[in-house]
Amino acid sequence: MDSAGADWIHIDVMDGHFVPNITIGPAVIKALRPHSAKPFDCHLMIAPADPHLEAFAEAGADIISIHPEAGPHLHRSLGRIRALGCKAGVVLNPSTGIDFLPWVMDAVDLILVMSVNPGFGGQSFIDGQLAKVEALRTMAERQGLAPVIQMDGGVTAMNAARCVAAGATALVAGTAAFKGGPSAYAANIAALRGLG
Ligand code: ZN
């Protein structure tokens, strides 16, 4: 994925409690770290997240994103991520509103809009979430801020342009990037960039 043109490596961490699946934890991220020169963008679908933030930072995370439902003090948790030397992200499930965001925007480097319900790969993109991206972009501009706005879930070459038009500045792709095996990665990523 590094040589195929990915900008970041997005790592979905699932705990079998906050989301149905169990994936990987800090030990595996630490083992992966020497094999990629790209930033590690760690999406924590775990609750609670606070007790584990330091372990993910030490494992080599560059960005740590958390769900507001994962703990009672989101602003504090985001500040803790930055204090550990990482960029801080907040993740919005399809059902999560955005009214709270102006109150934590100063602590946020990245906002991740889930375009599927988190927990599994290979799900279909929820079109309605594009309106949330548009609203977030307007909200951030009103505050004079420019956080990364990321979309995750069901992103493909077919809907990537609509995500970007809505205001997304980072696209996460699992199935669309990995399909066809290693020989297809570069073409898959080029297609997501609109170069296919
Ligand atoms: Zn993710």
Image (tube, rainbow, N blue to C red):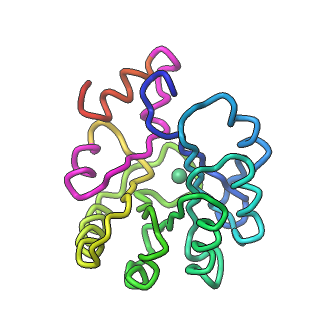
**Residue 42: within the magenta?**
no
For residue 122, above or below residue 51: above
Determine the residue positioned at 53% across, 59% down.
87
Q: Which residues are magenta?
A: 159-183
Q: Position of residue 183 (x, y in %)?
A: 48, 14
Viewer-proximal residue among 100 and 21 = 100
Locate residue 107 relative to residue 79 in the image: left or right. left
The C terminus: image quadrant? top left
Which residue occupies 56% across, 54% down? 63
Quadrant assignment, res 45? bottom right
Which residue lies at the image location 23% right of the left edge and 72% below the top edge?
138
Task: Residue 25 in the image: state x and y as whole percent.
Answer: 75, 50
**Nearer to us in this view, 55 or 94:** 55
Residue 191: percent from left, percent from top: 30, 29
Residue projecting furthest to the top: 183
Magenta run includes residue 179: yes
